[in-house]
Amino acid sequence: MLDFLVKGGPVLWVIIALSVAGTAIILERLLYFRRINTDEEKLFLRVKSSVEKGHFDEALAICDNNLSPLSGLIRVGIEHRGYPETVQKDVLKDAANQEIPQLEKNVSALGTIAHIAPLLGLLGTVTGTMKAFGVLGQFGAVSDPSVLAKGVSEALITTVAGIVVSVPAVIFYNYLVTKVNLILIKMENQVNTLILMINSVTRPEGARGASALSDWKSRKNREGDA
């Protein structure tokens, strides 16, 4: 094994480092998505039960004790109950945008690894070939094939290593991107369901709805000026 690493040259060590980083990202993201999926199912059912009873403070307390992205959206939805539906949709869209970075954490880094690993393999191929031709240029005809073996080995090993690292990285990158999109769609559907439920429990009078809309517009204008 050590001989294999030595023959691969310095480029191989970089590829191995990328492999370790990519594996760590994949495992961390898979465990994260598994955890929030379990947490969100329980969260949604508990909050739904509280909202149906009109216990909004209890629903907010449940959200405070949950760290999943859905809890932030539900909290925003509950806090803006009584606002016009257009306002609710806007604030929920803003809240969802704030959760995206956490869902996409390190996914772009995995995509980068998937793209540069084969390029590094190609770089190793070039440097290994250069070494082999350098030997031929220095000594002319070589009777001992082992003299060329080091350069040829580096060329072949780094090419294979780059592809081996890139293929699973590409597969899991596409999987994680799709997973994030599905989670966002699921979260949107769950929050919309709760909003309909909240609005059916607390139907504001026209004056209160107009006042809420005015307050929201004023706040948005202040944020725009800032």
Image (cartoon, rainbow, N blue to C red):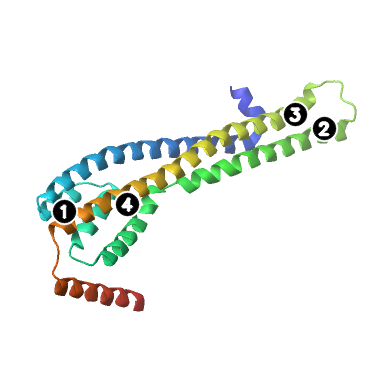
Kindly identify which numbered label has been placed on residue 60. 1
Whole-percent x, y for residue 132 in the image:
79, 32
| Amino acid type, residue under disc 1 in the picture | Leu
| Amino acid type, residue under disc 2 in the picture | Val
**First reached walking from the N terminus: tag 2 or tag 1:** 1
Mark 4 and mark 2: Cα distance apart in space: 63 Å
Between marks 1 and 3 in the image, the one whose residue lies nearer the viewer: 1
- Image quarter for residue 1? top right
To which residue does mark 3 refer? 152
To which residue does mark 4 refer? 188
To which residue does mark 2 refer? 135
Disc 2, disc 3: CB below 8 Å?
Answer: no
Between marks 2 and 1 in the image, the one whose residue lies nearer the viewer: 1
Residue at the (13%, 57%) spot, across then down: 201
Mark 1 and mark 3: Cα distance apart in space: 64 Å
Kindly identify which numbered label has been placed on residue 202. none
- Image quarter for residue 123? top right
Left or right position of 101 against 67: right
Q: Secondary structure at mark 4?
A: helix
Residue at the (82%, 32%) spot, across then down: 135
**First reached walking from the N terminus: tag 4 or tag 2:** 2
Crowd rating for badge 1 (residues with CA inside 10 Å; few <14, some 14–19, many 20+): many
Residue at the (15%, 75%) spot, across then down: 207
Between marks 1 and 4 in the image, the one whose residue lies nearer the viewer: 4
Left or right position of 182 against 166: left
